[in-house]
Amino acid sequence: MKLIDLLKATTARDYFTARNGLLVPTGNLGISRSAMPQIKDFKKFEKVLGGYGIRIKNKRVRIGDISLTQNEINKDKVFKLMTEYRNANVRTRGGVNIPGFPPVLSSDNFVLDGSHRQVAMYNINKHAYQDYSVVDYPIRELYSLIKDNPAKFAGCVKYQGLME
C-alpha cells in the first residue's frame, strides 16, 4: 500500500501548510500563550462578566477580519484542528463548524480564547464566516480586568503553557 492511499490529499496539504507555510493573522498584541486566559467554564465566565455589566453576544464575523492577542502558536495543535475541521465540514465556503463554544472575541475583534482554532480556520478559508462569542469590551481592558481580578475569575479561567 502506498502512502498516498493512506492520506487524503487535503490532510497532506494541511500538514505541510502547518509545518512550513502556516498563515497567521497579522497584528497580534504580543502576549505570551502562558499569560493568556483560557476559558474553562464559559457559563460562569459569562456570569462573572455580567456582574461587571459586560455582555456577551453571538456574532457571525469574517474569519480574516480577526486579530490574535497572543504571539505564540503551536503548529501541531493547529494541524490537528485543521484535520478535525476538514473531517467535520465537507464544505467550508460558508463557515467552519467547531465543537464547543465558539472562539471568544473582544469588541475590537481580538481573540481572547481560541487562538489555535482561529488560526486553523484562517488557514482553511479566511474568507468564510464563523460564529463567535463577542464580549462587549475592548481587548486591552478585558485582558486587564481578568488579570487584575484572579479571585473573581478563578472558577472559570485558567492559564496554560505553549506545549499543551
Image (tube, helix red, strand yellow):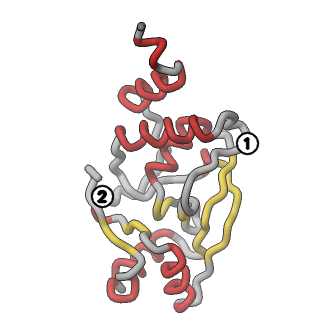
Taking 91 as reference, is 119 above or below it?
A: below
Quarter that holds the N terminus: top left
Q: Position of residue 131 (x, y in %)?
A: 66, 57
Which residue corresponds to the image point at 58% horizontal and 83% vertical from the top-left?
54
For residue 19, side relative to residue 163 (left or right): right
Callout 2 crowding tier (Cα within 10 Å): few <14, some 14–19, many ≥20: some
Give the numbered dot on residue 32: 2
For residue 112, side relative to residue 95 (left or right): left
Q: Nearer the viewer, residue 99 or 78?
A: 99
Instruction: Give, as a three-letter code, the residue at label 1.
Output: Gly
Instruction: Give, as a three-letter code, the residue at label 2.
Output: Ser
Disc with the residue nearer the chain's start (1 vs 2)? 2
Q: Position of residue 148 (x, y in %)?
A: 34, 83
Give the quadrant of residue 121: top right
Taking 25 as reference, is 112 above or below it?
A: below
Secondary-structure class at tag 1: loop
The residue that mark 1 highlights is 94
Q: Nearer the viewer, residue 50 or 2?
A: 2
Q: Nearer the viewer, mark 1 or mark 2?
A: 1
Numbered-mark total: 2
Q: Nearer the viewer, residue 43 or 94?
A: 43
Residue farthest to the right, as pictured: 94
